[in-house]
Image: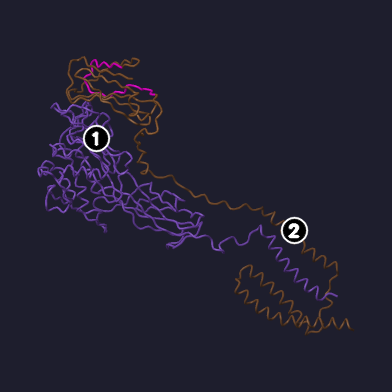
């Protein structure tokens, strides 16, 4: 319960249009304004907070008190100090030499209001700063996906070496076995076909390497078809000659 | 009694009805014809200084009574003030419901020789905007006498150009104050502007006298302050705001959107991820007579697909060309180049240009990968071994 009294001892009566407002402002910017009723010299308002709980939207917390007094007859001259005395529940403001309209902050008030029931009205929405859309937005830089981690080059090269070991082992093994080319046809005809056969196989393998490096499938297949026909012809001659020679050796 | 206090929706609304939009080279965004609707033709002479200045700027004025039967605007059976209240409500501005109410301020009133009732207000709480109020600061307070209005604070289209001070309130000056007034403090706006989303501009003022010859010429001294000004800020205020309302300032246009890969000049129909591209646009501002390059440092470009992936400030070399360059994100899809530019007092720019972004083609990846060398070696060593084996096996004895 809050009681507030305003009196002016200077003898001038308040003319209409006078304004005596008491404003309570909550920290969340919700404001409540009260007109202080009164006669020519005295203004008194009694605020019964328990009764006003619903009007205050059940907002507890700190409220700033502000008093504004204005009158058409108050002409601004000098502004003197006025004393403000605070009682426990009674505020008396003495406007000793005050002749002017004023807007004065009176201090703060802590209100501990009961909890809001289910159907209580909500306080009006405060402005969400509509000027926010007038400011430039924060810059956004796209974060690119980090490529997958790969092993070090040395590791890869080491494993390449390891992969080649079996091949080297094969060559060494062949040497150990004493491989020779004694069975190569000595007659010029079959020798030529044999050479062509192996040259053809080498050409096909070279074609595969070229395909991997830069050719496309169509060109590769074209050349492969030529080589394939050639190889069939040459290979048949060579292999049949070889098998005849071996058969003759076996039977002889 | 309502007539002199009736708000005059200063021809900006009428301008919308009559003007033609011409954006050809050299022609401004709005036509030059202006319709002035008044309740009483005496306004023509009592506000002659203001109308004279408008005509001096090249506007072609035509005066008509509000209930002129020849007007093709809709006629309502209500009075002009109700009509204007309705238009203001559509703009989001609510006037005090009491038609006899005026804004009263016992602290910030303008002192005069006659004992007034503090309804003549010396307002100096002006909006901070060079676009709306001009680059030169208005030193003297602006005289105002009339009705107040308020806008919902969450409405971002309405701006309070001249607000009342915290001690002001709106009530009938003749009658005693019975209940708490609905409009009090800084929430009261004396003059506001609204810029709609289609960039139409409306200025709403609660005081017709603000534009009158008497106020434009008179001096002002705020009660309680020792400083007295020979000329009130009304003339400068009225000239500058009318320039803004008639689109002679703060009207932007954006043309010539261009984008291309860095190093090329043609505009591709599609980008690939991780491409470097450059975007440029030209922005001009209408100066009342011609389109001048607009210079600012906060125009931003967005590369947008459901949300902006890239948002960058654009730089300008003061010749109206704004450009930025960035790397296309490694996400593929259909993106948009978006420029969303809304600033206080300026017309909004909202540009969007769609562009697809494709992923890598199969042959745009890395060709030979070191960590795959073991596999290459395996393959080729097999081929070699096959050849050697075929020779060795056939001819070995």
- Disc 2 packing (10 Å; few <14; some 14–19; many ≥20): some
Q: Position of residue A200 (x, y in %)?
A: 71, 77
In the image, the segment drawn in magenta is A91-111
**Residue B278 coordinates in the image, percent (x, y):** 44, 56
- Which chain is rendered brown in the image? A
Residue that lies at the very extreme toward the right in this rendered image: A252
Q: Is residue A77 above or below residue B90?
A: above
Report the disc number at residue A162.
2
Q: Quadrant of residue B132?
A: top left
Foreground pick, B89 / B380: B89
Asked if labels 2 and 1 touch by Cβ distance under 8 angstroms, the answer is no
Q: Which residue is mark 1?
A: B139
- Work out how far the residue at label 1 is from the one at label 2, CA to CA, in angstroms: 88 Å
Q: Is residue A90 above or below residue B268?
A: above
Give the side of residue B157 with respect to residue B38, left or right: right
Q: Residues within 10 Å of mark 1 (few under 14, many from 20)?
A: few
The purple chain is B
Q: Nearer the viewer, residue B259 or B15?
A: B15
Is residue A98 on the magenta stretch? yes
Q: Nearer the viewer, residue B224 or A43?
A: A43
Where residue B378 sits, quadrant-wise, is: bottom right
Q: Position of residue A149 (x, y in %)?
A: 62, 52
* Residue occupying the point 74% across, 58% down: A162
Q: Chain of mark 2?
A: A
Which residue does the image show at 21% across and 54% down from the upper left? B19
Q: Quadrant of the C terminus of chain B?
A: bottom right
């Amino acid at each position: 319960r809050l009681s507030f009294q305003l009196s002016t001892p200077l003898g001038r009566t308040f003319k209409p249009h006078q304004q005596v407002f008491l404003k309570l402002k909550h920290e969340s910017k919700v404001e409540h304004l009260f007109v202080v009723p009164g006669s020519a010299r005295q203004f008194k308002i009694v605020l019964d907070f328990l009764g006003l709980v619903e009007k205050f939207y059940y907002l507890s917390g700190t409220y700033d008190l502000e008093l504004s007094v204005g009158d058409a007859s108050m002409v601004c001259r000098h502004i003197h100090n006025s004393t403000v005395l605070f009682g426990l529940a009674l505020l008396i403001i003495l406007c000793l030499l005050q002749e002017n309209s004023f807007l004065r902050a009176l201090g703060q008030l802590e209100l501990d209001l009961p909890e809001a029931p289910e159907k209580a009205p909500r306080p009006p929405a405060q402005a969400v700063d509509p000027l926010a859309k007038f400011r430039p937005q924060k810059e956004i830089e796209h974060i690119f996906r980090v490529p997958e981690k790969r092993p070090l080059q040395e590791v890869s090269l080491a494993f390449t070496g390891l992969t080649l070991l079996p091949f080297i082992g094969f060559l060494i093994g062949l040497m150990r076995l004493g491989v020779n080319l004694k069975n190569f046809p000595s007659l010029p005809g079959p020798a030529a076909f044999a050479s062509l056969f192996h040259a053809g196989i080498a050409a096909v393998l070279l074609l595969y390497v070229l395909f991997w490096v830069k050719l496309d499938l169509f060109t590769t297949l074209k050349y492969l078809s030529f080589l394939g026909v050639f190889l069939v012809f040459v290979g048949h001659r060579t292999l049949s000659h070889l098998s005849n020679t071996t058969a003759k050796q076996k039977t002889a | 009694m309502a007539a002199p206090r009736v708000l005059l929706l200063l021809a900006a609304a009428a301008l919308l009805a009559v003007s033609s939009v011409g954006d050809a080279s050299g022609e401004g965004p709005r036509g030059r014809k202006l319709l002035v609707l008044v309740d009483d033709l005496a306004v023509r002479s009592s506000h002659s200084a203001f109308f004279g200045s408008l005509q001096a700027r090249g506007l072609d004025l035509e005066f008509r009574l509000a209930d002129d039967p020849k007007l093709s605007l809709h006629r309502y059976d209500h009075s002009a003030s109700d009509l204007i209240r309705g238009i203001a409500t559509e703009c989001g501005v609510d006037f005090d419901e009491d038609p006899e109410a005026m804004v009263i301020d016992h602290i910030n009133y303008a002192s005069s020789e006659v004992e007034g009732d503090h309804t003549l207000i010396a307002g100096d709480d002006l909006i901070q905007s060079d676009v709306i109020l001009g680059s030169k600061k208005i030193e003297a307070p602006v005289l105002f006498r009339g009705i107040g209005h308020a806008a919902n604070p969450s409405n971002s289209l309405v701006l309070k150009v001249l607000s009342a001070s915290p001690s002001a309130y709106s009530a009938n000056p003749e009658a005693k104050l019975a209940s708490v007034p609905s409009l009090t403090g800084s929430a009261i706006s004396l003059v506001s502007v609204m810029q709609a989303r289609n960039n139409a501009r409306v200025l709403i003022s609660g005081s017709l006298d603000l534009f009158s010859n008497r106020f434009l010429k008179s001096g002002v001294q705020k009660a309680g302050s020792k400083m007295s000004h020979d000329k009130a800020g009304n003339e400068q205020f009225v000239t500058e705001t009318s320039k803004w309302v008639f689109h002679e300032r703060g009207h932007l246009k954006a043309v010539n959107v261009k984008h291309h890969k860095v190093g090329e000049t043609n505009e591709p129909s599609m980008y690939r991820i991780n491409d470097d591209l450059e975007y440029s646009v030209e922005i001009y501002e209408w100066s009342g007579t011609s389109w001048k390059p607009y210079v600012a440092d906060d125009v931003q470009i967005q590369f947008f697909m459901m949300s902006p992936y890239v948002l960058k400030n654009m730089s300008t070399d003061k010749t109206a060309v704004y450009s930025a360059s960035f790397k296309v994100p490694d996400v593929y899809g259909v993106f948009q180049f978006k420029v969303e530019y809304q600033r206080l007092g300026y017309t909004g720019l909202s540009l969007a240009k769609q562009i697809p972004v494709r992923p890598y083609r199969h042959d745009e990846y890395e060709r030979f990968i070191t960590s795959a060398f073991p596999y290459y070696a395996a393959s080729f060593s097999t081929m070699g071994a096959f050849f050697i084996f075929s020779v060795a096996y056939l001819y070995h004895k």
